[in-house]
Every structure is written in structure tokens, then in C-alpha cells.
Amino acid sequence: MTRDQIAEHLRFAAELGVAGVSRDPAWRLRTTAPSIPPASHSVDDAQVEPPPVAAPHCVDHAEALAAIKAEIGPDCSRCKLHALGRTQVVFGVGNPDARLMFVGEAPGGDEDTQGVPFVGRAGQLLTKIIEAIGMTRDEVYIANVIKCRPPQNRNPEPDEVARCEPFLFHQIDVVQPRVIVALGKFATQALLRTLDPISRLRGRVFEYRGAKLIPTFHPAFLLRNPASKREVWEDMKLVKRLLAESFPPES
């Protein structure tokens, strides 16, 4: 990174409320973290997710994800979005063995053009959020509830979700992340099968397909409401804690 890039990253971290940094390699694996009051970060034991689906039997996760992508195909016509102006299917990107996975709503214009999720302005902000917890995009896995851009970036409709979400469930079951971050109202409501607003759901931990699911605000919302970055930072500190508990330092 250049000096200007480092300075920009530090400014963004300060906006999130990061008080300092450490060059200690053990930082990423530390288990100490601010205590989480049960009232605001309770675990919902209800089985809100659909049952696991059978993943392709492949040698490794990368091959399994490639098989799912091939099953979808480059010209998927399972829902009406294929005839409503989408350019291409936007599958998912990142580490097939990621311990942390981000799930968004649907591709936008930049994603539809490049075929990669979260590459526009919201995606650039997501990259900074990932870096703020000491990770890189290459270390996580990123996908959306649906794989094709809705016209004018409208919310996906129920029939579109119903046809596409099984592929997301396949992705989750193959990657087997320890923590899933649901980005924004739509992704959270779709995954948790709820109509509760994101303001009621964020700050909580849900059991989901063998992982801990953390709802938080969508990066696009943060671009319009930068004051909410502090709340997202609280959510990401929770993510860090859960990851540290899943991967304690070796003695």
C-alpha cells in the first residue's frame, strides 16, 4: 500500500471508532474483546433457516463451488430477471474455505457489468470494513441472495428469491463459514425468514446452517448515513470475537 492509501485506511478506521492498531501477529487471534451484554447480543436458538441441501460431492470446496456455478449456468432463465436486462449471472467470489462470509441482496450495475459481487462504491466500502478487522477480501467469501441484477436495482421479488436462494444455501453449505454477516435489511430478512426491521435484528447473534449469523447495515446504507458506521463497527467487533472463539491461539 502507498502512504496515501495507508492514511486513507487509517482515517476510515478512525471513523469506525478504532482507537489504535497493533503490529503483533497474534492480534488477529486474540480472544479478549469487549464484553457483550446478553440483552443486546442474545443468541436466538430458533431454527429459522431452511434445512441443509445436498452439496456436490467434490474433492474440495473450490471444486464444489465451481460445480454449483456450472449448475446455474451462464444464461440462467429460472426466473424472470433473465429477460429484464441483466447482463450476466453474478455468482460469488473469495476464499472457498473462508471462515467469514458476507451475504448481500443482489448485484448492482457495476456488479452486473463485471460479474463480481460488491465492486461498486458499496463494495469498496465493504473492502475497507473487512480490512478494518484485519482481514482481506481474498480471505472471506462474498455472495448475494440472488445472482442477477433486478431492473433499476429494485428489491428482489418473492418468486425471484424462491428460485435463486437454494444456490446461496449450497454456497453456504460448501464454504462452511464460522460467521456469516448479512448485509442490510433484505439479506437479513430473506435469510432469517422474518419481517423484523434491521434495527431490531442487528446486534444479535443467530444460529444459521452451522454458523453464527450477524445482521448489520448494508454498505450502501452507510454511504447515505455515515453516522451509522459506528454501529457497524460494533457489529464487526462482535464478528472478530466470534472468529477468535472459533480459532483460539495455539498453546
Image (cartoon, rainbow, N blue to C red):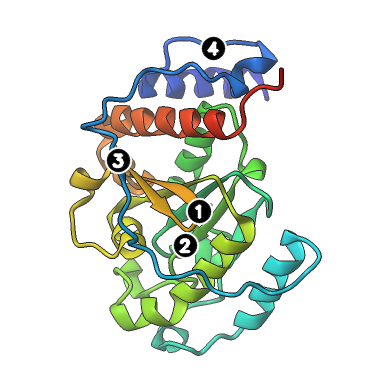
| Residue under pointer 3 | 204
Q: Earlier in the sequence, mark 2 or mark 4?
A: 4
Q: Earlier in the sequence, mark 2 or mark 3?
A: 2
- Please give the label number shown on residue 144: 2
Name the quadrant of the N terminus: top right
Separation of marks 1 and 3 at Cα, in angstroms: 16 Å
Question: Are the residues flagged by discs 2 and 4 in contact, CB closer than 8 Å?
Answer: no
- Please give the label number shown on residue 132: none
Binning the other alpha carbons within 10 Å of mark 1 as few (below 14), some (14 to 19) or many (20 upward) gives some
Who's the residue at 18% across and 56% down the image?
196
Separation of marks 2 and 3 at Cα, in angstroms: 21 Å
Q: Earlier in the sequence, mark 1 or mark 4?
A: 4
Separation of marks 3 and 4 at Cα, in angstroms: 26 Å
Separation of marks 2 and 1 at Cα, in angstroms: 19 Å
Residue 10 visible:
yes
Viewer-proximal residue among 231 and 219:
231
- Please give the label number shown on residue 21: 4
Q: Amino acid at mark 4?
A: Val
Q: Amino acid at mark 1?
A: Gly
Q: Secondary structure at mark 1?
A: loop
| Residue under pointer 1 | 210
Q: Earlier in the sequence, mark 2 or mark 1?
A: 2
At which x and y percent is residue 93?
A: 62, 57
Separation of marks 1 and 4 at Cα, in angstroms: 31 Å
Separation of marks 2 and 4 at Cα, in angstroms: 31 Å
Viewer-proximal residue among 131 and 61:
61
Mark nearest the camera among 1 and 4 is: 1
